[in-house]
Image (tube, rainbow, N blue to C red):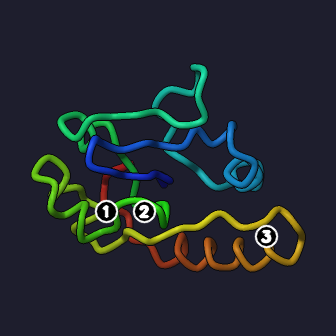
């Protein structure tokens, strides 16, 4: 699974261990695609020319502030991504780190992961 934010200049991919929410989920067994776990920033940036070959995962979570499935499909270098073609791209907004918010967020994530099909991209 990949959590990302896409914009006109490319895609920003979360480093799960650097974001509290993704770190929590990873500790509980969610597998995220980690392209470069090191570095100075919480997110890695990839140009559209490199995004499709760098981005793997059966499920894409798109930050609500960035491109969504329709805009991703408009990018010629990303349009054939297996998760996009399988309609497994979902808007995602981080939740507060309190118990109630995270419980609801985890239930939603569990449904998405359970429903996702293996598209051979992970």
Q: Earlier in the sequence, mark 3 or mark 1?
A: 1
Using the image as rendered, state which of residue 1 and residue 114 is in the foreground.
1
Residue drawn at x 30%, y 42% is 10
- Identify the mark at residue 15; answer none if there is no mark: none
Mark 3 vs mark 1, foreground winner is 3
Q: Earlier in the sequence, mark 2 or mark 3?
A: 2
In the picture provided, is 106 more to the left or to the right than 89?
A: right
Residue carrying label 2: 59
Residue carrying label 3: 102
Residue drawn at x 23%, y 55% is 81
For the residues marked 1 and 2, what is the alpha-carbon distance in whole angstroms? 6 Å
For the residues marked 3 and 1, what is the alpha-carbon distance in whole angstroms? 25 Å
The image position of residue 103, as x and y in percent, is: 80, 75
Q: Secondary structure at mark 3?
A: helix
Q: For the residue carrying disc 1, how many other residues have a C-alpha within 10 Å: few (<14), some (14-19), or many (20+)?
A: many
Residue carrying label 1: 83
Residue drawn at x 42%, y 62% is 59
Pointer 3 with pointer 1, Cβ within 8 A: no
Pointer 1 with pointer 2, Cβ within 8 A: yes
Hey, which quadrant is residue 85 in on the image? bottom left
For the residues marked 2 and 3, what is the alpha-carbon distance in whole angstroms? 20 Å
Q: For the residue carrying disc 2, how many other residues have a C-alpha within 10 Å: few (<14), some (14-19), or many (20+)?
A: many
């Amino acid at each position: 699974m990949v959590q990302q934010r896409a914009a006109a200049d490319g895609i920003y991919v979360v480093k799960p261990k650097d974001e509290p929410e993704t770190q929590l989920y990873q500790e509980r067994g969610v597998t995220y695609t980690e392209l470069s776990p090191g570095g100075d920033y919480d997110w890695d940036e990839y140009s559209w020319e490199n995004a499709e070959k760098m981005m793997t995962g059966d499920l894409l979570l798109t930050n609500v502030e960035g491109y969504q499935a329709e805009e991703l499909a408009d990018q010629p270098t990303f349009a054939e991504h297996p998760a996009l073609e399988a309609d497994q791209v979902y808007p995602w907004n981080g939740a507060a780190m309190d118990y109630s918010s995270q419980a609801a967020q985890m239930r939603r994530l569990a449904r998405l992961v359970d429903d996702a099909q293996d598209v051979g991209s992970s």
